[in-house]
Amino acid sequence: MRAFLAALILCLGTGPVLAERDRIAWSDLIDSDAQSYEDPFLDLSYEQLSALRTKVRLEERLEASTVSDDERAAIAAQIGEANTLLKNEGIDADWLVSQRWIVTERRERAASAGNPALDGVQVSLAGFAIAAPPDADGTPMAYLVPQRGMCSHVPPPPANQLVRLRLSDDWSPRILHEPVVITGQLRIEPDKRRLMVVDGIQTLEATFAMDVVAVESFLTEKAAGPSSSRVSGWSEELIRRLEARQAATADQY
């Protein structure tokens, strides 16, 4: 019980094991400056977005040289209907279309921009480890994600919520999504790789890399055995508390 309490305190970041400045949450990885931007599409209803998509799709089709004159007339009529619907609701459809790639870039930056204040800093971060193939120089590798199931049964997280781990030779994940606290030097080092996981090949984009110097695992030896991928009851409780904490953090963004 004492070991469990010590592990829980360490993982949830409420005890004296590490200096306060070294413990970070996943929300700390996000560049807050990149989160504030104008997105005019957020205020559109489903019907308005559908009309806008119809307009874009048909205008692209109208540019095709293989479209007959009769088809062009029908397509132009459909575009006119979409424009009229949007105009009657006070929406400048042509301006919105001109903004779509600008907004796409803003969204991508918000999902990938890392907190520059953490670049080169040694930190400790709780999460779930996923084994990965060795790096080109033979270094053992893994990924750390904020929630169990990411990159396997659910899509990978945004790039600024994924950390690529350079491991030492004395530890590697023993099961998929092993609950751990990882300590090491964090660096902003964008990386994109394809990795085979449970449901097939996934593309993993990570904003951060970490040179790991210490690992605190919450997996029992029994759970790590070749015949079982289960964790102990208290580890399951720890996982639930980790996931609840990550969900609470995500609600802030």
Image (cartoon, rainbow, N blue to C red):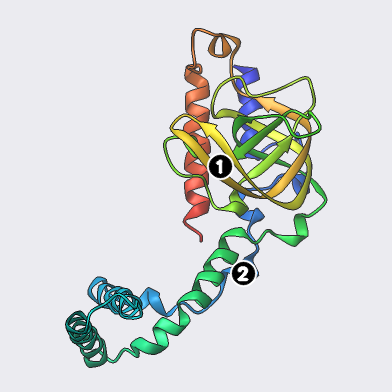
Residue 176 lies, in percent from the top left, at 54, 26
Amino acid under label 1? Pro
**Rendered-image quadrant of the N terminus:** top right
Disc 1 or 2, which lies upstream in sequence? 2
Residue 247 circle label: none
Give the number of the disc on residue 146.
1
Callout 2 amino acid = Ala
Identify the residue at image location x=77%, y=50%: 187
Q: Assess disc 1: are there few (<14), some (14-19) or many (≥20) residues with their C-alpha within 10 Å of its C-alpha.
A: many
> Is 27 placed above or below 79 here?
above
Residue underneath mark 2: 34
Above/below status of 185 relative to 175: below
Residue 127, image x, y percentages: 60, 37
Instruction: Examine the rendering and report whether any part of residue 147 can be seen.
Output: no
Could you tell me if residue 210 is visible in this image?
Answer: yes
Q: Position of residue 77 (x, y in %)?
A: 18, 86
Q: Give the x, y percent position of residue 73.
A: 19, 86
Quadrant position of residue 215: top right
Q: Residues within 10 Å of mark 2 (few under 14, many from 20)?
A: some
Asked where in the image residue 36 lies, by quadrant, the reply is bottom right
